[in-house]
Amino acid sequence: MACGTYVRQRRKERQVMNILTNDIENNDIKNFKEIVFNIGRSFFIGSNDYSFTLYAESMKRERKEIFDFLLSFHGRDDEGTIAALEHVLKNQNSVPDYFVNGLLNKYTYVENDEDLLVRTATEKCPQATKLLLDKGLDANAQMGDWTPLHRALMIDPDNRSEELITTLLCYGADPSVEAYNGYNCFELAMRHAHTDFVREMLFDFTFDYHSHHNLHISVLLQLGKLKSPLFHQLIKHDVEFFLDEYINTPFLENLSDLLLLEFDYFKIIFQKYNSICFEIFKNYIFHYFKSEPSSRGSFFGRRLPDIERCLCAEQTLMKFNLLLHGPASLNKNVIDFISTLDSYKVFSHISKSTNQTEVTEIFVYLLTWGLRVRSTLLDCVFQEYGYCELFKLLLFMDVEHNKYGVVHPSALVFYICEINSTLDTLSLTEYTVDSVFELMNYFVHPKLDKYRSQEEPSKKLEITGNYPHIPSLVEIARNTFREYFVTKFDIKNAQQFYTLLNRLPISVTHKKIISLETKLYNV
């Protein structure tokens, strides 16, 4: 079709639509019918906008006669009629019942039009759903693998969805029918955070003491997290639990939900469903070691929440003690799990929720069972608590240096840990100004004096009066001893250095000076 011809045709169509909308406004049914019969059905084919516009205008202005004519003129498969139906379903509260019922009746001329029932459930239309059910449609009608009850449970919960679910159950909807992802209706209600009323109603409709049930373990874990009375009711039934397969990250969600449980709920699951605990840990370990080190913590490019955050929960030690003294097969998986934890993240999360004594106790326990120490952990502990007992303990451990996302520790921690380093070789530009100034409490060195004169004028004034010009005899003796000690015993790392230092028959005071625990200058 030539461009000019197309433009002229579109202009003519708009003129016709203007006349028709004016007829609706004026309620001129005679002229409206005459024009529609003259232009015929072909005018509306290929553009559902035209017929939908006429439906919308007739409903807006409440022109019932024109609306009824449109219903009789258009077929039930007409795109404009379908669009009008979707419009009233989404805006049912603002559309008069006459028009809602008219469109619904249009779609219930054919017996068992199940797709429409599923659609009314999807759009959260309890009145429309009840009207269709009253007309005899099956409450368990399926569109694909979904029933109306499935769709009602998968939409965002609110008062309308609660009314809709109640209506469907009253009309015989079967909550035991599984959706395509293997979840029954009670499980869908749990996953989509429906109200206690909906969960309890579906529980009563689903479970009885004479039947065997198969459920995803996530349901029981969620009930435990919510401290729901349904948790204790459910474990009294004949239920076999299994791991979730259809959620995006079951290996993470199942484990995090388990670890976040209060101890009483955790203990019940461990004692009653020991094998599923084994599968949860095994599944997580498998996915962890299967992934590349650089991609751990992500799933198909999506960042996952840290599993370490689950250790902020109370009674962490009691939970691990229970797990590690369980069956040998579970014990191994739990030890492997502890070895996967990022010690820096563990400390970051735990230190926010408890005191220093409890943090130290948790870390001593986890280190005993194979928690790996990263270099960033020492820096984090030192910044939070200073040269504390936990920091001293970590100096005796094998330390892993991060290969991905390297974070430089403080200059002082670096010097404490890297026993072969010297101020002459230390690159001060890699550290913060405060971190470098911290070294001045332990060293008098030309490099530090030069740095002090170039950085932070305000801080320069603060420390000028206290900072000596030459090192003290204690510092010279300390530095000389450290250098001799490392050379004499061919020490390679901090673990060797502080282990041997601890064995020397010298006073605690001297050990604190050599290990840089004691400050020599007060700047």
Image (tube, helix red, strand yellow):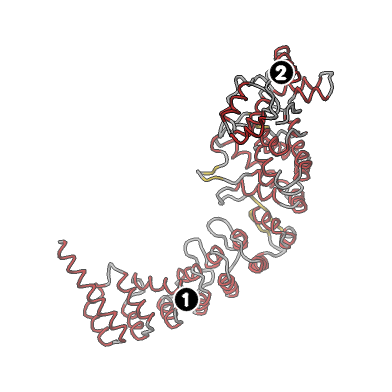
- For residue 279, side relative to residue 81 (left or right): right
Badge 1 element = helix
Q: Position of residue 262 (x, y in %)?
A: 74, 52
In front: label 1 or label 2: 2
Q: Position of residue 26 (x, y in %)?
A: 30, 86
Looking at the rendered image, the quarter that the C terminus falls into is top right
Looking at the rendered image, the quarter that the N terminus falls into is bottom left
Specify the label residue 92 is tagged with: 1
* Residue in view at x 57 percent, y 69 percent: 158
Q: Nearer the viewer, residue 189 or 413?
A: 413
Q: Position of residue 77 (x, y in %)?
A: 35, 71
Specify the label residue 217 is tagged with: none
Q: Nearer the viewer, residue 403 or 66?
A: 403
Q: Nearer the viewer, residue 463 or 259?
A: 463
Q: Nearer the viewer, residue 286 or 27?
A: 27
Q: Amino acid at mark 1?
A: Gln
Q: Position of residue 17 (x, y in %)?
A: 26, 76
Badge 2 element = helix
- Going from N to C along the chain, the mark reached first, 1 or 2, is 1
Specify the label residue 479 is tagged with: 2
Relative to 133, residue 144 above or below: above
Toward the top, the furthest residue is 488
Picture quadrant of residue 420? top right
**Tags 1 and 2 touching, CB below 8 Å:** no
Mark 1 to mark 2: distance in Å?
82 Å
Relative to 413, residue 75 above or below: below
Relative to 1, residue 386 above or below: above
Q: How many marks?
A: 2
Q: Amino acid at mark 2?
A: Asn
Crowding near the residue tagged with mark 2, few <14, some 14–19, many ≥20 C-alpha atoms within 10 Å:
some
